[in-house]
Image: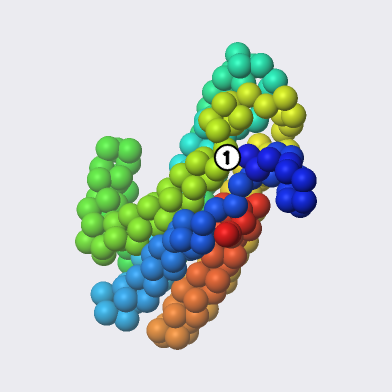
Amino acid sequence: MIAEDKPGSGIAPGTPAPTSRFFLYLPIFVLLISNAIPLVGVLFWGWDTFVLLMLYWIETVVIAFWTLVRILIAGDFAKSFVGEIIGRLFMFCFFLVHSGGFMLGHFIFLWAFYAGDWSNKIHVTQDFFQIAPREFWNKMVLANGLLIPLAISFLGRGIAFVVEMAKTPLWTHLVSEGATNTKNSALVGGLYVRIVIMHLVILGGAALAQKYGALAPLVLLIVAKTIVDVALFIRIDLKGQRAV
């Protein structure tokens, strides 16, 4: 809901209503759990640097998914109903293609520099789009238990999305007289800012782990990634939410 400008309330018109502490902190707690699981993977399940990189790469896909959903439901592109629908569909398709190409390029970079022995386990042939994705899913995602932290991460970010949508009537999201592109720039720009910052930290830690071949760099990588991930999550996904 939108907070009313009652005398003495100190709340400006159009300010989102406060969110209960439970629903504000729950997605952060879930996100912390999903970031803690890689520690178990490294210490007890035999995860190496490349497995961690693949987990974090797929997590970026999860973030991109919720960004696309936000564009469709919480976009703010026009002052008319028809214009809003067209704007959302156009931005959704554009961002889907753009982010998809970015993610593919990022994956190729990670594969070329960090795959190591994994390039022999997951064979890439001329039928790449028929064989390699299936092998990647079975030998990388399922065999290493990556679905567990990915599912928890998806849930945490989904909770944050539901909390955000519940604060404001759907019609306000669909058509707003004060429509600007600022919010949409924040949605799209926020994803790429998150990707760049987070993966600079990840790649730096991965380089140290590969060079020294010990558990310590991997643990430090997980800790650094968790701190950056939670900080960006609060700044971008929970931006403007106030607890009561």
Identified at 29% across, 60% down, the residue is 148
From what the image shows, is residue 142 above or below residue 163?
A: below
Give the residue pinned by disc 1: 1
From what the image shows, is residue 124 above or below residue 94?
A: below
As helix, strand or loop, the secondary structure at mark 1 comes to loop
Q: In this view, does 185 lie to the left or right of 114?
A: right
Residue 64: x %, y % from top left:
50, 45
Nearer to me, 116 or 234? 234
Residue 208: x %, y % from top left:
52, 78
Q: Is residue 73 left or right of residue 5?
A: left
Which quadrant of the view contains residue 173?
top right
**Residue extending furthest front?**
7
Identified at 58% across, 40% down, the residue is 1
Identified at 66% across, 37% down, the residue is 184
Residue 7: x %, y % from top left:
77, 46
Nearer to me, 192 or 180? 180
Kindly identify the amino acid type of the residue bearing the numbered disc 1.
Met
From what the image shows, is residue 182 above or below residue 122?
A: above
Nearer to me, 113 or 59? 59
Identified at 70% across, 20% down, the residue is 79
Colour setting:
rainbow
Which quadrant of the view contains residue 36?
bottom left
The answer to whether residue 48 is seen in the rendering is no
The answer to whether residue 49 is seen in the rendering is yes
From what the image shows, is residue 119 above or below residue 187?
A: below
Q: In this view, does 192 lie to the left or right of 41?
A: right
